[in-house]
Image (cartoon, coloured by chain):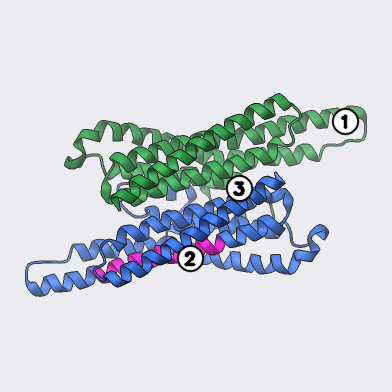
Chain colours: A green, B blue
Amino acid sequence: MLADEKVREFLKSVCTSSPTPGGGSVAALCGALSASLSAMVCNLTIGKDKYKDVRKEMERVLADSSRLVERLTELIDEDAEAYESVIASLRLPKETDEEKEKRMEAMQSAFRRAIAVPYEVMELSLEAMRLAHTVARKGNEGAVSDSGSGAMMAFAALHAASMNVRINLKEIMDKEFMEDVEGKLRKMEEEADILRSDVIMEVESKL
Amino acid sequence: MLADEKVREFLKSVCTSSPTPGGGSVAALCGALSASLSAMVCNLTIGKDKYKDVRKEMERVLADSSRLVERLTELIDEDAEAYESVIASLRLPKETDEEKEKRMEAMQSAFRRAIAVPYEVMELSLEAMRLAHTVARKGNEGAVSDSGSGAMMAFAALHAASMNVRINLKEIMDKEFMEDVEGKLRKMEEEADILRSDVIMEVESKL
């Protein structure tokens, strides 16, 4: 599994001409880095007398962050697997009409999977941005640069994942599905933009 | 070394209440992820007949990206070391006047180091954004979402590193130095904003 590679090996795996791991796996990792930073800020807040009023909230954020780290780590591999299914479907035989139809069906199903994975990365990265926003506002002020860094990581993860949804969305023949997804992407990007401004204002007021 | 940890272990190391590795190390890793994606796009471009006119340029970008991956990987650890020196300086004895002066000098020197490391991460991330811009414009179009993802990673790395410079800059007593650095940060952030818009336009036109 990619998450079991050493950091420097993972970076090397990205560099090679093999298309996996690529932008989708990197987006998932970047989302996981964001949630890890929020978890760290929670751990630097919980138990400190100055922050006793937000203890319960920080415990909830910690639990949510930990769940996000775990799932986003799985998605590093799932993105690579989804893309490999796309490649496999493209290589299916296409001589007879029956083969052509089978190949087309396999391709559509593989592309839908290659959309579903970065789409989930977007949803979880948006959640990670909300958690980073909470820890920037209420968590340990000495770690506010970590909260802000976490928000930036989730912002990048969301946008990188969005590009990976869109490049695969082009291949989908169901126009209604395409438009539905496109609308949802735009909504998530809008919320992410607002959250980024809010977190930056919060961090700058404390720096 | 942090770069020798498995990806999932590195994420766990971030989560703990130990302040290192924190936002600074994550920023360096995120910059390295950006340069890795640009290197991948170069490797998916070089040798392809369709892109023979840009071969030389892609080879240069590949060499630059590889250098950035290497240096940014070192900076993951250097950021943690710099922060640990800050902690060590804060723990120095401060009973006598002589001890106080020694402690102050050690702190100023430790904070300058804790500024220099994320400052270098910012410079290299800006360079990584320029490389991502080039591969988005001239590299393999089938990998344009990877070029765009790389640009987003470098953008987040630059901003996260910037927050880490600023939180340490507050502790510097030399006001001239502070203002000089602050001016340079703002310039880099402005260039990063322009590059991000340019890359997003480029990617969207090809998606």
Please give the name of the residue rendered at 74% of the width and 62% of the height, measured from the top-left corner. B46
Q: Is the magenta region chiefly helix, strand or loop?
A: helix
Tag 3's secondary structure?
helix
Same chain for mark 2 and mark 3? The answer is no
Magenta residue check for B199: no
Say whether disc 3 or disc 1 marks the residue closer to the N-terminus: 3
Q: Are marks 3 and 1 on the same chain?
A: yes
Separation (CA) of disc 3 from disc 1: 31 Å
Q: Is residue A19 visible?
A: no
Residue corresponding to mark 3: A23
Dot 2 alpha-carbon crowd within 10 angstroms: few under 14, some 14 to 19, many 20 or more:
some
Residue at position x 52%, y 62% from top?
B126
For residue A78, say whether it is visible.
yes
Foreground mark, 2 or 3, reads: 2
Would you name the residue on which mark 1 appears?
Answer: A99
| Highlighted magenta segment, given as a residue range | B108-128
State the image quarter where residue A185 is shown: top right
Q: Position of residue A46 (x, y in %)?
A: 25, 39
User: Quadrant of residue A79 in the image?
Assistant: top right
Q: Where A122 sits versus B51, above or below?
A: above
How far apart marks 2 and 3 lie (CA) works out to 22 Å
